[in-house]
Amino acid sequence: MSNTDFVLSVEDLTVSFDGFKAIDSLNLYVDQNELRVIIGPNGAGKTTLLDLICGKTRASTGSIKFKNSEMTKLPEYQIVRSGIGRKFQTPSIYENLSVFQNLEVSFPRGRGVFGALFFKRTEEVKNQVQTVADEIGLGSQLDTEAGLLSHGQKQWLEIGMLLMQDPELLMLDEPIAGMSVRERELTAELLKRICKGRAMIVIEHDMEFVKRIADKVTVMHQGKILAEGSMEKVQADPRVIDVYLGH
């Protein structure tokens, strides 16, 4: 497979903080329409890797190519515009706005709350809001104030806010933390649904959940990739059992 076929190619990526290599000569290749899960012990560099891909942290050396374009020198907003969406661990929704309004302000033309006040509610925006709301299971809650949603629904709304921008690569950091068993099941279904037509990278600790969603699992340890492949393959890898699954 040539380099050009990947939606994301990370090559020889290194970032040092005060001489400590948080990411150490890392290579990662993600296919189009692939749902990749990254697992590994705390301090393995998982969140730092997402920070590097979305431009929040700058690489010391190496290359991050998204659809064959180099991203390492671009500012964060340009990386977002190029089609990369990122959800952090804590939801950042507008609690006092409705579900509809949260999705509406996330439409690319209405960057932020003030931008959104000055463009008309075109059919295009309304249709996109309805499509995304249905996709995240909140189609019947458009008028609900976001602050009244359950913890899980707030997480789904935030995923929806990213989907409004129709990213080609979506990155989620521990999306099921704090969710009920039922919400976890619904989230697994949701992620499989929204992966059609885009690639996703998910960081997760819950192995049952990983099994349900992953096309491929990458195990990180000390800033490097320790193992990669199907869940069955990495679970049977003695090194992975030793540093991660054995604890």
Image (tube, rainbow, N blue to C red):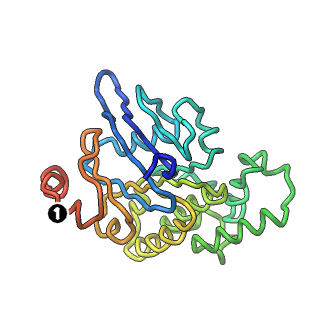
Q: Secondary structure at mark 1?
A: loop
Q: What amino acid does circle 1 point to?
A: Ala
Q: Picture quarter containing residue 234?
A: bottom left
Nearest the viewer among 187 and 59 is 59
Q: Picture quarter containing residue 149?
A: bottom right
State the residue lying farthest toward the top: 18
Nearest the viewer among 213 and 144 is 213
Q: Is residue 133 above or below residue 87?
A: below
Where residue 215 sits: x, y (%)?
38, 65
- Crowding around mark 1 (Cα neighbors within 10 Å: few <14, some 14 to 19, many 20+) is few
Figure disc tally:
1
In the rendered structure, the answer to whether residue 247 lies left or right of residue 72 reads left
Where residue 164 sits: x, y (%)?
66, 59
Residue occupying image coordinates x 61% and y 44%? 80
Where residue 4 sits: x, y (%)?
51, 47
In the rendered structure, the answer to whether residue 135 lies left or right of residue 233 reads right
Nearest the viewer among 73 and 70 is 70
Nearest the viewer among 55 and 1 is 1
The residue carrying mark 1 is 236
State the residue lying farthest toward the front: 2
Residue occupying image coordinates x 40% and y 38%? 11
Where residue 51 sits: x, y (%)?
46, 40
Residue occupying image coordinates x 68% and y 54%? 106
Location of the C terminus by quadrant is: bottom left
Q: Picture quarter containing residue 214?
A: bottom left
Residue occupying image coordinates x 58% and y 66%? 148
In the rendered structure, the answer to whether residue 74 lies left or right of residue 48 reads right
